[in-house]
Image (tube, rainbow, N blue to C red):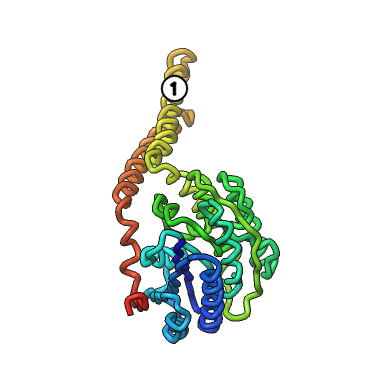
Amino acid sequence: MKYSIIVPLYNEEKNVKLLAKELFHALNELKKTNERDFELIFVDDGSKDNTFNELKSINGKDYKIPLILIKHRRNVSQSAAILTGIHKSNYENLIFLDGDLQNDPGDINILVEKFETGYDMVVGWRKKRQDSFINKTLPSLLANSIVRLFTSSKIHDHGCALKVLKRKIFDDLIEWSGDFHRLLAARASDMGFNVTEIEVNHRPRKFGKSNYGFSRIIKVLMDIIYLGFLKNKRKSLYYFGIFGFSSIFLSLLVFCAMIYWKYFISGSFILTPLPILAVFFLLTGINFILIGIIAQTIISKNDGTKENINQNYIETIIDQRKD
């Protein structure tokens, strides 16, 4: 089987060479045990340090692994960096891992072996996390609980970057933005793919600092709400339509109450909040319907643009596959 390994990086100058060395060793060991081909793609997401210069000093030919180096003009997001790597990859299977050395490249072996038994995706589970409980582990536990509550996923650790998956999963996705890489396993489960997890090693961060904390919970909530509308692109209009016509129906009920008040009770509804409620529900319903139409138009328009969404961010590509 053939695999493209994609590693997003941001300000990891002290980790790059150590990570590359471990990756090359792990991949060559995998090649020995089975007929597998690999390509390694590093994506520097607009680092402000010397990360990309450190990358350029690495030569994949020394390890007989094709190497692709990509640099974004500015920091976009980890999801965007992964997306860039996917578009530049050649193989039908993908492997993701972080560039901070907390994921153990040696664990790629057990994930690949599990993946090759017939799964569509295998996700790492950092059961024994080596992070601060308050700043990292607790927010992760809360975020994972929210994801399991609102999706069909049973995965414990959606935030673990170490994943092996079929490229088809990405190709079938409707949308990829924000921090959606963290919801990839949940989305794949909702789409009916066969997803499992396996416990992996997790190491303390030696160099650099993490950019995540409790803000991740808010991002997960927003992404889940968004995905609720995108789960089936043909239904996005109907979601808004349900709210819209329900609101218009409430407006009609309020109007009927006004008529009843006027002609059967012989009272004046002008002094009641009924006219305001009728207008409020009517305008809210119309707005929901219009938003649904706009959302459907945008989704349909963007169906064919995912392929080029990151092209404007790319500053440099060094493709050693062509040398």
Q: Quadrant of residue 104?
A: bottom right
Question: Residue at 42% across / 28% down in the picture?
Answer: 251
Q: Quadrant of residue 217?
A: bottom right
State the count of labels.
1
Left or right, residue 296 beside residue 151: left
Kind of residue at badge 1? Met
- Residue receiving disc 1: 258
Q: Is residue 280 visible?
A: no
Closer to the camera, 161 or 277?
161
Closer to the camera, 149 or 55?
55
Dot 1 lies on which element? helix
Residue 40 drawn at (x, y percent):
45, 72
Residue 184 drawn at (x, y percent):
50, 55
Q: Name the residue at the top extreme.
A: 264
Residue 264 drawn at (x, y percent):
47, 13
237 in relation to 248, above or below: below
Q: Quadrant of the C terminus?
A: bottom left
Left or right, residue 67 beside residue 184: left
Q: Residues within 10 Å of mark 1 (few under 14, many from 20)?
A: many
Question: Residue at 50% across / 64% down in the picture?
Answer: 95
Question: Residue at 34% across / 72% down in the picture?
Answer: 314
Question: Residue at 40% across / 36% down in the picture?
Answer: 238
Q: Is residue 10 visible?
A: yes
Closer to the camera, 238 or 29?
29
Residue 210 drawn at (x, y percent):
58, 72
178 in relation to 322, above or below: above
